[in-house]
């Protein structure tokens, strides 16, 4: 039975600390903050995606959101639990390339791009998209002040998009991926420790399933919208609702096809 929508804004440490559940500090996993786990866990949710996978790989997590590009890195200790995570088709609105020049100019003129350190998946996706469309690797720049474009994700991207005086969006990476492949994109998956007891896995998949269901209800959508507007991520309630309508927390066959294509394309591109 679905639990009542919870207030999980107080931070980590919910539950009794029997197991460790690692969320990421990204708006896209807001559906999994709707319901407090009804089984004993320590909920850790202050990690960027680039760090969450390392906790999983090191055996420090029983259940974790893992960036899709890092699935092979955790495969020895973690396995997928159902088909839950973060997926989107078309413009996602929170994985954005901001630039001082159009996308084609950035590529053809070799203008430097600063990549977020928060998400290896988004970094690899940008490089793959540039290679597929322009046949070149983007020119990368570590110094933000010397860049002509900036790849941002999550809360940073949403806040930056509201800055009317700043650089404009030149590409939504999820939309760009769909234009190239006609597939949705999977950014992250929930993974469970292979050695975790079967009873824990059953409780975990039930919680994830309830969260995904809650995110599609009017109450769940309004809760997510209210929280994120209060956090300054969206200009108004309608914009927040539109964002969460685009996010899928439970994958279908098309999502899994997009995920498989992305991982195979990374291997092919690396081999060239």
Image: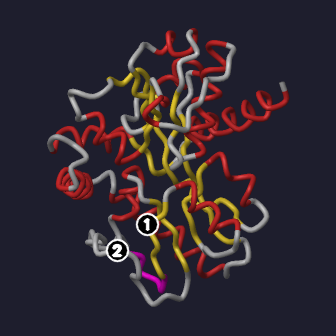
Q: Alpha-carbon neighbours of circle 2 within 10 Å: few (<14), some, or many (≥20)?
A: few
Secondary structure found at label 1:
strand
**Secondary structure, magenta segment, majority class:** loop
Tag on residue 22? none
For the C terminus, the image quarter is top right
How far across and down, in percent of the image, does residue 235 sit? Answer: 17, 40
- What segment carries the magenta color? 36-41
How far across and down, in percent of the image, does residue 115 sit? Answer: 53, 37
**Residue of label 2:** 11
How far across and down, in percent of the image, does residue 121 sit? Answer: 59, 43
Q: In the rendered structure, which disc, 2 or 1, sits on the residue that comes first in sequence?
A: 2
Q: Alpha-carbon neighbours of circle 1 within 10 Å: few (<14), some, or many (≥20)?
A: some
Is 86 part of what is drawn in magenta?
Answer: no
Q: Splitting the image into 4 quarters, where does residue 156 fall?
A: top left
Q: Residue at x 61, y 24 (%)?
A: 139
Q: Nearer the viewer, residue 186 or 253?
A: 186
Q: Residue at x 68, y 17 (%)?
A: 136
Q: Is residue 117 above or below residue 201?
A: above
Q: Splitting the image into 4 quarters, where does residue 158 fall?
A: top left
Q: Is residue 116 above or below residue 180?
A: below
Q: Is residue 38 above or below residue 154?
A: below
Report whether 44 appears left or right of 137. Answer: left
**Residue of label 1:** 46
Secondary structure found at label 2:
loop
Assess whether mark 1 and mark 2 are in contact (beta carbons under 8 angstroms): yes
Q: Nearer the viewer, residue 199 or 99?
A: 99
């Amino acid at each position: 039975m679905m639990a009542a929508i919870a207030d999980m804004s107080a931070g980590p440490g919910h539950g009794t600390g029997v197991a460790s559940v690692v969320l990421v500090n990204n708006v896209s996993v807001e559906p999994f903050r709707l319901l407090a786990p009804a089984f004993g866990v320590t909920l850790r949710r202050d990690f960027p995606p680039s760090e969450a996978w390392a906790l999983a790989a090191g055996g420090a997590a029983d259940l974790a959101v893992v960036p899709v590009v890092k699935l092979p890195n955790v495969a020895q200790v973690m396995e997928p639990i159902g088909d839950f995570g973060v997926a989107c088709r078309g413009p996602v609105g929170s994985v954005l390339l901001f630039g001082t020049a159009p996308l084609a100019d950035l590529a053809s003129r070799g203008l430097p791009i600063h990549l977020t350190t928060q998400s290896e998946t988004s970094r690899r996706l940008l490089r793959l998209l540039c290679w597929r469309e322009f046949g070149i690797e983007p020119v990368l720049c570590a110094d933000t002040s010397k860049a002509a474009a900036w790849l941002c994700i999550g809360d940073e991207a949403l806040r930056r998009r509201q800055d009317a005086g700043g650089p404009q969006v030149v590409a939504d990476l999820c939309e760009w991926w769909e234009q190239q492949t006609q597939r949705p994109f999977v950014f992250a998956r929930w993974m469970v420790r292979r050695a975790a007891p079967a009873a824990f896995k059953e409780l975990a998949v039930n919680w994830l399933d309830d969260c995904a269901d809650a995110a599609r209800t009017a109450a769940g959508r309004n809760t997510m919208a209210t929280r994120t507007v209060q956090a300054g991520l969206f200009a108004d309630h309608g914009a927040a609702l539109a964002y969460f309508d685009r996010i899928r927390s439970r994958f279908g066959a098309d999502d899994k096809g997009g995920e498989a294509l992305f991982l195979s394309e990374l291997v092919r591109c690396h081999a060239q």
